[in-house]
Image (spheres, rainbow, N blue to C red):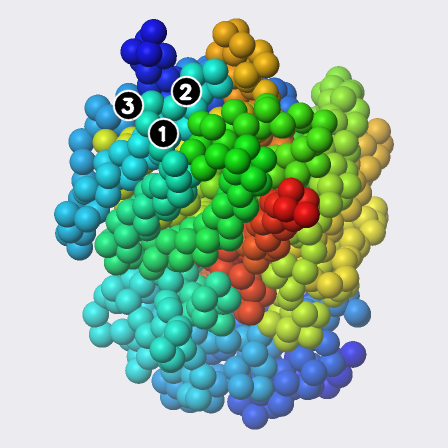
Amino acid sequence: MRAAEFAIHLLLLLAFPPILLGVINKTKAAFAGRVGAPLLQPYHDLLKLFRKGLVLSETTTWVFTLAPAAALLAVILAGMLLPAGPLDAPIRFTGDMILFVYLLGLARFLIATAALDTGSSFEGMGAAREVSFACLAEGAVLFAFLVLAKNSGALALSSMLRGVEEVEWGIAAAPLLLISAGLFIVVLAENCRVPFDDPNTHLELTMIHEVMVLDHGGPLLGLILYGAAIKLYILGALLVQVLIPFDNIGPGGAPVFVAGLLGLAVAIGVVESIMARLQLRHIPYLLTAATLFCAFGFLLVTR
Amino acid sequence: MIPGQSGFAPVANSRPLPLGEIRILPWEDFHANLLQAVSRGGRVAALFGMSPHGENQLFLVLADDTDNKLWLARTRLEGPSFPSLTPSCPQVHLFEREIAEQRGWAPQGHPWLKPVRFSFAFRSGPAAPEAAPTIGVTDFYRVEGDEIHEVAVGPVHAGVIEPGHFRFQCHGEEVLHLEISLGYQHRGVERALIGGPDKRSIHYMETLAGDSTAAHSTAYCQVMEALGRCKEPARSQVIRGIALELERIANHVGDLGALSGDVAFLPTASFCGRLRGDFLNMTALLCGNRFGRGLARPGGVRFDLSTELAEELLQRLDSVESDLASAVNLLWDTPSVMARFEGAGPLLKEDAAELGIVGPAARASGLLRDTRHDQPWGIYRFVHIPVSTGGPGDVFARAHVRWLEVQRSMAFVREQLRTLPGGPHRAECGSLAPESVCVSLVEGWRGEVCHVAVTDSEGHFLAYKVVDPSFHNWTGLALALRNQQISDFPLCNKSFNLSYCGHDL
């Protein structure tokens, strides 16, 4: 049973994420009055990239080649710390939430380092943007974890997210809603979605995340995009588990979890369809708002 | 406005003038009169060098927009150089650089004398490069300092667009200075036209800037008709007007969609992308080509507009109108879009006037400047389209001016389709008058298109000068970017949407 749960968890983590991108794109297409790319297009794109050859700039070193794979590993490891609806996390120990945050931070550090390794002014610009916005988003996530820890009295992610259900939503609704709002903003920011970034743009001067990976191509770019999809899944899963009490649902929770993630992807698609991007210098305001939401939630549970 | 006794010769848009009627002024008079005229609101539409009978001459076309007149002047250069006019009249800065590059005549004291297109000179001179210049290799303006960084973009861009090199001097995200280096699309059209016209000429004109085919081909045809003593039939004037306005609508609609796409606002971007195609297809109904190629020919138009076709066009206009209005109005009604548009890339009215900016970009800065209104030609002499202006000169103003123009152009096209005059659609054009000059101005969708033809004693082109609106406006874009966020560059760039090949010729 334990092995089966582990296998399903891993399958979700590794095979499911790209379809979220497909759902987002389908939603956007529907809003624009288009048919849109097939739902499974992201898988085809990844396969295409992995089949391609590699072009490396002469100015790059081993950092550039190694970073995408290392970053992907860090993200997968972070995913293993997180329960998936009714399925427990394969790895869990007291304080693993700190490791979770820092594994995501490590992945970002590796990609930013690889960007700086190219010596291009674009990539440096992108790396600077990425890390300055990320450090604002991290605060929100940490405050959200503090709320969950306080609610559940536990310091392991699995127990913390279970703890949501033990305390009645009725009682803890306000802080949970606040951190859900904060986490939704973080999901958009961390995954370079509108209004923070435009995943469709080809304009190198306006991009945040994409400009960091301009010099990566073929399999390396495939690793980065795959890692980004998994990150979307992880942060989405975190939000879905805050919102849905899986312990009360019981064994039928797995489909609900998947449906919740798909619903979140539709929500992201709707946001992207109805609003424009923020001006770059206004992004910190929204991220600060996310941190304040989570911090205020923490204030409510500590009083 | 400009005193007649100054020695400048008055002429109307698209009217011939014997070259002899333009007196050759001494440099001092030429210089003083030009400065005086510009200080009173005159605008330099063209300034170029030519060499009739081996004599070096500067030729000036000055537009007087309030009195609806053009003033022509020329002066003889005694040596291979002349004192630069740029320090006292900034709007000639690029013309002087062009003269230095094409003719090798050095404007002494030009503050920023660099290649324009990195092309071979027409003839040798002190300012002409010794060898073929390497494109893009030049001294860029640099800002010094520890925290300053330089961002070089292009000539190969991430999107499928024309090549051009942009050099940003940045402090963090803030742009302190932008320098634009073009020339990658240089084809040598002006040089190829010397000795013309021939069978190729009209095809050069239609592809000077592919998105302004109607404007450039109309301007050329008017030159040919004026110098060929041909009276263009009323019916063809109307058809050309319809083609020009359809071109304007299609491009403005495309731009509004692209602006929306640049701020990642999908609904308008998708709808305008489709609607632009609908307008291009209307042009295709006129002449079989979506960009209006093959329509205007010296003497008129090649294709008549039948009553059934007019009905069909009217129906199509009706069917797209409500879709277009709801897609575009969504832009103004969405706060997140307006937050991006308002205040981005402002071009001050004073700067726009001083640089001689034309077209929607000038009108968005509050300048009342529209060739259809100021220097009317063809059908625009009889039917007036209100000039659409905006206030602050930011991205919003440039977008909104486009929307106003689209609506007014649609009304114009409707009216003209309902009241098509009868008669032939094409007349015969004679050979060109010798020793004559003709200036033809047409308001293309990007701004004023200026064609100047000077003929020799045989009636061939001694010089044929083309000034695309992009030639004036690129500098405006560079100024609009100052102290802006570098991440807003694509948005500002799209709000001007200038042509690379129109500039490079």
Name the residue tied to disc 2.
A88
Residue closer to the observer: B369 or B74:
B369
Query: Mark 2 touching mark 1, by CB under 8 A?
Result: yes
Name the residue tied to disc 3.
A48
- Amino acid type, residue under disc 2 in the picture: Asp
Image quarter hosting the N terminus of chain A: top left
Q: Give the spatial CA distance, label 3 vs label 1.
A: 35 Å
Residue located at (50% from left, 7% from top): A251
Name the residue tied to disc 1.
A92
Few, some or many residues within 10 Å of mark 2 (<14, 14–19, 20+):
many
Q: Give the spatial CA distance, label 2 vs label 1.
A: 9 Å
Query: Mark 2 touching mark 3, by CB under 8 A?
Result: no
The chain holding disc 1 is A
In this view, the mark in front (2 or 3) = 2
- Amino acid type, residue under disc 1 in the picture: Arg
- Amino acid type, residue under disc 3 in the picture: Lys
Residue located at (81% from left, 48% from top): B385
Left or right of residue B334, residue B133 in this image: left
Which sits earlier in the primary sequence, circle 2 or circle 3? 3
Q: Please tell me in which quadrant of the rendered image residue B144 appears.
A: bottom left
Q: Give the spatial CA distance, label 2 vs label 3.
A: 33 Å
Whether labels 3 and 1 belong to a single chain: the reply is yes
Residue closer to the observer: B387 or B442:
B387
Seen in the picture, residue B161 relative to B44 is either above or below; the reply is above
